[in-house]
Amino acid sequence: MKQINDVVLRTATKAAAVIILTFSVSLFISGHHRPGGGFIGGLAFVAAIVLLFLVYDIESIRKNIPIDFKIIAGVGVLTSVFTGVAGMIMGKPFLTQAFGHVNLPIFGETEVASAVLFDIGVALTVIGTSLTIITSIGDDR
């Protein structure tokens, strides 16, 4: 196979992947008070990884990210379920949210909510499931 000089493509992809990953974190964080959250933040994260899969090959990326995405999906589902069950343990309905305020050194008065744990579970589930499907489809084995 002929080696193609794709320095510009690879450099632009690295920059784009960093921008997309930063945007996915922003979408995740904004989901508590504005549109966004775990689902769309997870999908944006997957988009950045898929971009890397397309420019580099899947095996190269898998060597650099040696994570079993099925385990990530399982951890995400368990996190979301346990967040919901926590309300039941306290005698409240499933997925009852608890929240409060803490004073953080740099950020000052900050709201902390159990919904963030649920969103983390959703994001991990979306990331793990999507990347498992994509790598399964893209496998040459």
Image (cartoon, helix red, strand yellow):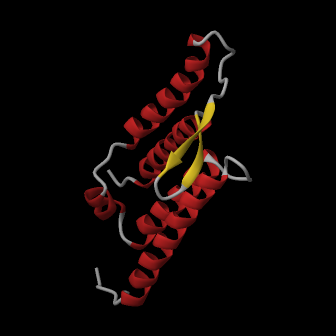
What residue is shown at x 34% (from left), y 90% (from top)?
A: 5
Give how far across and how far down residue 52 sits, in percent: 42, 68
Specify whether 110 is left or right of 124.
Answer: right
* Picture quadrant where residue 89 is located: top right
Determine whether 118 is above or below 83 in the image: below
Name the quarter where the N terminus is drawn: bottom left
Determine whether 132 is above or below 55 in the image: above
Question: Which residue is situated farthest in the right direction here?
Answer: 34
Determine whether 101 is above or below 9 in the image: above
Nearest to the observer: residue 18 or residue 86: 86
Determine whether 92 is above or below 80 in the image: above
Nearest to the observer: residue 111 or residue 96: 111
- Total numbered badges shown on the rendered structure: 0
Nearest to the observer: residue 103 or residue 135: 103
Nearest to the observer: residue 25 or residue 101: 101
What residue is shown at x 65% (from left), y 55% (from top)?
A: 30
What residue is shown at x 51% (from left), y 56% (from top)?
A: 46
Give how far across and how far down residue 84 sits, in percent: 59, 23
Give how far across and how far down residue 100 sits, in percent: 61, 35
Give how far across and how far down residue 112 sits, in percent: 58, 40
